[in-house]
Image: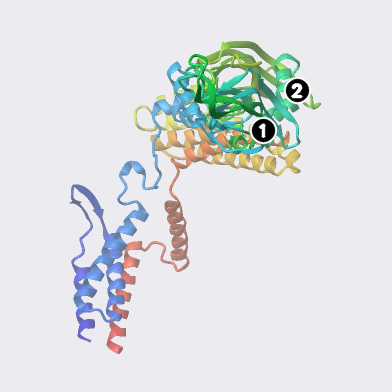
């Protein structure tokens, strides 16, 4: 009972000593305290203190809990309502609350978000290729194998790469060591070494033969020039049923089905086989008395004489190379689809994400291209490729090539034709190579879409046997888009900035800004109308249907922000709202609309690329929009106002009602304590 009375006194003291409504400084930060803070502190202190007393806590502990609860509740209240947020943040919880003039006109932040961090330069291209090379770098390791047949008086070891990517040439090293015992005259002669691959269908690939005699013998005084070990290096290649098709795409009319087959090709399981033929000629030591021709006397002598010949006919088989095979398809990150057409005057190429396949351990590449790709225009491409002869060490090789860069036009009759192409060669691919070309996207009534490919056919030559042909294909994740115009032009934005330059909005400013926005809204309505019409043809394609729905949602959000811009007298809000409408949500809607079209054509990857850009813009918009907590708080505030109005107390300040609630709680707690 004593604790209860003391706690009641503490509650009265707490409320009486709360700060009055004024601003004060704490650790250099100004806090704008008011009666709402008083109420929040009171509720927190009384509620948590009462819980502590009810639980039987000592009065000092209850007081401490009450103070802590008061502070915690008021802190949460101030955070939720935005009272501690600087004025510039507009108490919405938004990450960004203003748009710079440079960003408003030029969209530099949008450019960075969509283009990524890689703009072309010799340095950035070299760094980019180096990063890819590091990921695909291979070392050499020992292979285990099974032996069948006869292998006498010689030991064999095998080495190969620890990683092989795709349909690549790769080194195999065989080491032969004599393992003779007994007579120094004995030797092993390897007459033939044959190496090849056998795939899972039993087909033999890339047979290579070394037929020079290899004589192995223990070095001794009688045989000082004898060779005890010998190393053979071979260049092999993963089974590749696609090389003929790849060559045809460089030299003949391209076929889209074949190009897609190359992009998705996978290596079949294979076994590495080595066949060794030869013989071991063995001598034995004999001892006995023999006539010395000089003295004419019989003396004890040791001599060597032929014993026997053992045929070497053995086969080594291993799956080690297959176990180290990795899919040749690799993906490199970068920009997707195309940047919005507002950036059409940007000429510096950017790195595009792309898929590649083929002899990935031998040839790697990267595609750079113009930021914008739209119909009835041309785009600059820069393909950077480099061979990787170091992945074939210890076999010294050269890699020479022919290439073809091409754009396919996909027609509505299902036929793909060449829209633009550039053939050529890099010659020695051991060095950094690049080709710059212009490819165009001329559209006619039958055109549905375009695709870009870069194909390389190269010969890997080790000067031992015939060169091995390898191939590489790159498909950048580019999607050509309509050359759309945006409702809020640069001229309009510059005019708006001029109207806002004095930091205020006059009646005449408002009138002109409203005119500009209504012109923009009319332009946007045309896009919205077209999207609504097109949505009817996507009923049977879920991805297309969802994409066009997203387009309409983003267009609607653009309208909402245009309306907000017309109904504010805050210059900064005019900029932010028109920026969100014209530079974020409208282009995002355009991306979704283009994505829906690509999905409907079955070009899901192009659709995904465009959808990815739409989502990036939507994420950027979220940085300028109120936080979830602020939005929820606004909703609750509306409900609370409706609640008060229903009881006829709509004009009563919230602070007064909160203080009444506190008093009721305190009195109620006191009555309960007295009764108990």
Cα gap from disc 2 to disc 1, whole angstroms: 45 Å
**Which residue does the numbered mark 1 point to in the structure image?**
314
Task: Name the residue that disc number 2 marks.
Answer: 255
Q: Residue at x 25, y 70 (%)?
A: 66
Instruction: Assign a secondary structure to mark 1.
Output: strand
Q: Is residue 158 left or right of residue 79?
A: right
Badge number at residue 79: none
Residue at image position (28%, 60%) is: 37
Percent across and percent down for residue 102 are 40, 25
Left or right, 188 with respect to 21, comes to right
Residue lying farthest to the right in this orientation:
413
Q: Quadrant of the N terminus?
A: bottom left
Callout 2: few (<14), some (14-19), or many (20+) C-alpha neighbours within 10 Å? some
User: Is 660 drawn above or below residue 20 in the view shown?
Assistant: below
Task: Tell me: residue 188, above or below residue 670.
Answer: above
Tally of numbered discs: 2
Location of the C terminus by quadrant is bottom left
Percent from the top left, x then y, of residue 530?
A: 69, 33
Q: Quadrant of residue 168?
A: top right
Q: Is residue 392 visible?
A: no
Q: Picture quarter containing residue 376?
A: top right
Q: Is residue 202 above or below residue 378?
A: below
The mark closer to the camera, 2 or 1, is 1
Looking at the picture, tell me which residue is in the foreground, 427 or 449. 427
Mark 2 secondary-structure assignment: loop
Look at 39% across and 42% down and name the residue there. Answer: 95
Marks 2,1: beta carbons within 8 A:
no
Pick whichever, 150 or 455, lies toward us: 150
| Residue 569 location (% of width, % of height) | 41, 38
Instruction: Give whichever of discs 2 and 1 has the lower sequence position.
Output: 2
């Amino acid at each position: 009972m004593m604790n209860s009375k003391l706690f009641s006194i503490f509650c009265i003291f707490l409320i009486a000593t709360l700060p009055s409504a004024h601003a004060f400084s704490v650790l250099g930060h100004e806090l704008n305290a008011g009666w709402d803070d008083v109420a929040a502190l009171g509720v927190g202190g009384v509620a948590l203190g009462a819980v502590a007393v009810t639980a039987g806590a000592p009065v000092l502990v209850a007081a401490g809990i009450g103070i802590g609860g008061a502070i915690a509740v008021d802190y949460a209240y101030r955070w939720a309502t935005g009272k501690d947020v600087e004025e510039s943040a507009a108490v919405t919880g938004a990450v960004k609350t203003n748009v710079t003039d440079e960003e408003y006109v030029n969209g530099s932040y949008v450019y960075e978000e969509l283009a990524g961090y890689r703009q072309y330069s010799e340095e950035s291209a070299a760094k980019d290729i180096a990063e890819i090379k590091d990921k695909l770098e291979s070392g050499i390791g020992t292979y285990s194998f099974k032996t069948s047949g006869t292998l006498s008086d010689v030991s064999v070891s095998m080495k190969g790469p620890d990683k092989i990517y795709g349909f690549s040439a790769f080194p195999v090293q065989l080491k032969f060591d004599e393992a003779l015992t007994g007579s120094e005259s004995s030797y092993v002669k390897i007459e033939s070494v044959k190496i090849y691959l056998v795939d899972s269908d039993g087909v033999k690939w890339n047979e290579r033969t070394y037929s020079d005699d290899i004589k192995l013998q223990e070095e001794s005084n009688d045989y000082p020039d004898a060779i005890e070990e010998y190393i053979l290096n071979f260049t092999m290649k993963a089974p590749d049923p696609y090389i003929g098709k790849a060559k045809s795409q460089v030299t003949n009319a391209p076929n889209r089905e074949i190009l897609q087959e190359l992009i998705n090709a996978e290596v079949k399981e294979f076994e590495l086989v080595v066949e060794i033929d030869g013989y071991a000629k063995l001598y034995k030591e004999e001892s006995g008395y023999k006539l010395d021709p000089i003295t004419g006397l019989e003396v004890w002598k040791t001599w060597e004489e032929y014993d026997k010949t053992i045929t070497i006919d053995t086969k080594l088989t291993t799956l080690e190379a297959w176990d180290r095979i990795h899919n040749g398809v690799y993906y490199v990150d970068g920009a997707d689809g195309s940047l919005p057409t507002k950036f059409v005057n940007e000429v510096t190429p950017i790195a595009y994400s792309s898929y590649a396949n083929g002899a990935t351990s031998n040839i790697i590449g990267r595609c750079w291209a113009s930021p914008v790709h739209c119909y009835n225009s041309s785009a600059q491409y820069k393909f950077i490729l480099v061979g990787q002869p170091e992945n074939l060490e210890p076999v010294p090789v050269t890699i020479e090539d022919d290439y073809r860069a091409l754009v396919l036009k996909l027609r509505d009759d299902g036929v793909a034709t060449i829209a633009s192409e550039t053939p050529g060669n890099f010659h020695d691919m051991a060095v950094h190579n690049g080709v710059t070309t212009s490819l165009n996207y001329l559209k006619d009534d039958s055109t549905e879409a375009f695709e870009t490919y870069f194909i390389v056919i190269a010969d890997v030559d080790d000067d031992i046997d015939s060169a091995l042909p390898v191939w590489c294909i790159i498909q950048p994740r580019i999607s050509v888009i309509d050359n759309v115009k945006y409702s809020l032009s640069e001229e309009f934005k510059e005019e708006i900035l001029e109207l806002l330059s004095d930091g205020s909005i006059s009646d005449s400013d408002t009138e002109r800004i409203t005119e500009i926005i209504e012109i923009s809204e009319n332009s946007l309505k045309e896009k919205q109308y077209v999207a609504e019409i097109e949505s009817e043809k996507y009923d049977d394609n879920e991805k297309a249907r969802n994409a066009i729905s997203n387009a309409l949602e983003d267009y609607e959000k653009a309208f909402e922000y245009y309306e907000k811009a017309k109904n504010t007298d805050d210059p900064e809000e005019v900029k932010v709202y028109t920026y969100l409408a014209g530079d974020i949500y409208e282009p995002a809607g355009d991306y979704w609309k283009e994505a829906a079209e690509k999905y409907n054509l079955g070009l899901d990857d192009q659709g995904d690329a465009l959808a990815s850009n739409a989502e990036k813009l939507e994420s950027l918009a979220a940085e300028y929009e109120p936080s979830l907590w602020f939005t929820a708080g606004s909703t609750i505030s509306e409900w609370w106002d409706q609640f008060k109005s229903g009881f006829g107390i709509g004009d009563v300040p919230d602070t007064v009602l909160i203080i009444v609630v506190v008093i009721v709680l305190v009195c109620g707690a006191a009555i309960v304590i007295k009764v108990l």
